[in-house]
Image (cartoon, rainbow, N blue to C red):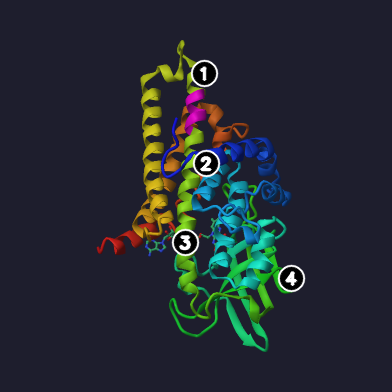
Amino acid sequence: MPPTPPFSDEHEQLRASARGFIERELAPHAQRWEEERWFPDEVFGKLAAQGLLGLKYPERYGGQGGDYLHEAVLIEELARTGSGGTAAGIGAHVNIATPPIWKFGTEEQKQRYLAPAIRGELIGALGITEPGAGSDVAALRTRADRVDGGWVVNGEKTYITNGVRAHFIVTAVKTSEQGGHHGISFLLVDRGEGVSSAKLEKLGWHASDTATISFEDVFVPEENLLGELNDGFKLIMANFQWERLAMALGAVGAMQLAWERTAEFARERQAFGRPLSGHQAIRHKLADLATSVYTCSCVTYDALRRFVDGEEPLREVTMAKLLTQRASFELMDECLQIHGGAGYMREYWVERAARDARLGPIGGGSDEIMREILGRVLAL
Ligand SMILES: Cc1cc2nc3c(=O)[nH]c(=O)nc-3n(C[C@H](O)[C@H](O)[C@H](O)COP(=O)(O)OP(=O)(O)OC[C@H]3O[C@@H](n4cnc5c(N)ncnc54)[C@H](O)[C@@H]3O)c2cc1C
């Protein structure tokens, strides 16, 4: 079959090699990592050795010199890890923590953080959300007070992916008394004195370390300011577009895989003298689910194509995020139903996939926030 645009033969070759690596090196351990509530840090080194942590980054930082389409392939394929938590930890590093350094960092910051992150030696996290500021990002209260040679940071972040393991946290702070979107800046905060983390228990994504991070009188040197002072909101907004597109791509990859596995199960499992797929209700259900996978991929690939072409497809990215995250959770629930009692059992992949998919409509901007953005874009 020819590749589906915007992907080309070259992207499909990357897909085949990434899939092989993921099925060989990551998927066999997914169940154990989920049970242990942790995937090993060495995973980053292994991905780096395959060139998979720097697909879209320039070669001078150790990247592969590719583009967002190469990254998109990896994101879709990470679903085959079979552990949403592992995919989330890798995704946070590649899709939300390192891109702002690439886009807004100084050359020195890129050499000090981006290059080792691409080599898998440093692990990154993005720290925006706080106990009192989630959807309402502008309400964040972590403060950075000016001192000789830099800043002193005090405050707390929460629900941060890679929050325990990260060596550096790309952290949103208030650097001015100005209210609203003004006075937010980003600092590259190294784990060290005054930085402490506590891992949180959650419904899904068990292998990932979602955590609260406390900053207590943490000194951050001048040269760790990322982007312009008091202009961090711009960075947040720029980052969101790729994060949301990445979430849509992740959902498409997960939906495709879940459909394939469920169709296979329905062809094999016998009930009332026939395979499940021989029953019209199940066959129609699978037809509807295939339609949902296809619809989600069309909308996502259209947003991706526009994004790669340099448009600012706020409407399309927002719609892709909104559509795919709920559709993915609903599809996983239907797949679970088709598996019957087996679907409710830990030993089957599908109960995990259903739990993991529940985060989608909440994280990276909730469904309600996507609708608010669309309300503005559509001039309602
Ligand atoms: C597993 C996990 C990993 C995460 N990883 C990260 C990370 O790495 N870095 C990071 O910074 N953050 C991360 N987050 C945080 C995530 O982005 C937030 O949870 C999300 O933005 C929602 O914020 P909140 O939880 O504070 O909910 P709230 O903002 O308190 O919202 C609660 C509910 O109210 C709704 N709501 C809010 N405002 C409106 C409105 N104006 N109109 C209608 N409804 C509204 C919301 O949609 C939601 O349903 C993560 C969260 C989770 C659960």
| Magenta span contains residue 262 | yes
Please state if 350 lies on the left or on the right of 40 as rendered: left
Between marks 4 and 2, how big is the CA–CA gap?
A: 42 Å
Q: Which residue is mark 2?
A: 10
Judging depth in this view, the residue of 334 and 93 nearest the camera is: 93
Q: Nearer the viewer, mark 1 or mark 3?
A: 3
Q: Nearer the viewer, mark 2 or mark 1?
A: 2
Would you say residue 109 is visible in this rendering? Answer: yes
Which class describes the residues within 10 Å of circle 3: few (<14), some (14-19), or many (20+)? Answer: some
Q: Secondary structure at mark 1?
A: helix
Residue flagged by tag 3: what amino acid is it? Phe
> From the viewer's perspective, is residue 134 above or below residue 183?
above
Depth check, mark 2 against mark 3: the one in front is 2
Q: Quadrant of residue 192?
A: bottom right
Q: Sequence-wise, which precedes: disc 2 or disc 1?
A: 2
**What segment carries the magenta color?**
259-264
